[in-house]
Amino acid sequence: MKTRTSKIARLPKAIRDELNHKIENGLLGTTITNWLNNLSEVQQIMAEQFGGRVITHQNLSEWRHTGFIDWQMNREGRQHWWEMIEAARELSQTGNPTGEKDASGYLGSILLVELAQALNQLHRTKNPRER
């Protein structure tokens, strides 16, 4: 992931996360820029680092195509891993009647889930060259 230096990238993570949720929920750009520009923390950062210039619709548009996309991909990646871990737990529990915690079995289960997903993706790929 690229280090960003835009107005929005310089905001604290908590504000960027809330912003990303607002974008994801379909809030209008003017509503979002008004919200951002009225936050005292944002005003302070804009004054210190950007000569007091406010966050514009263009800044928000650029963020939607860069930082927001990165945020979504990161979140989807974490969700994917949580689903794999949960599937591995289920496999470990059904395959281990004593209920003992076995790290190697657990990791093996994760590997099996990942392999099954890769094979499933391969199976869905119809183009022989892509396969």
Image (spheres, rainbow, N blue to C red):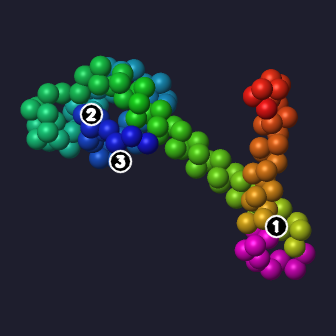
Residue 121 visible to the viewer: yes
Residue matched to label 2: 6
- Label 2, label 3: how far apart the Cα atoms are: 16 Å
Mark positioned earlier in the residue sequence (1 or 2):
2
- Residue drawn at x 52%, y 44% is 74
Tell whether position 102 is magenta. Answer: yes
* Circle 2: residue type: Ser
- Residue drawn at x 82%, y 39% is 120
Q: Main secondary structure of the magenta part?
A: loop
Q: Is residue 31 left or right of residue 88?
A: left
- Label 3, label 1: how far apart the Cα atoms are: 36 Å
Residue 92, labelled with which disc?
1
- Label 1, label 2: how far apart the Cα atoms are: 46 Å
Mark positioned earlier in the residue sequence (2 or 3):
2
Tag 2's secondary structure? loop
* Circle 1: residue type: Ser
Tag 1's secondary structure? helix
* Circle 3: residue type: Ala
- Residue drawn at x 58%, y 49% is 78
Quadrant, the C terminus: top right
- Residue drawn at x 43%, y 33% is 68
Q: What stretch is highlighted in magenta?
A: 97-106
Q: Count residues near mark 2 (Cα–Cα under 10 Å), then give few for <14, some for 14-19, many for 20+.
A: some
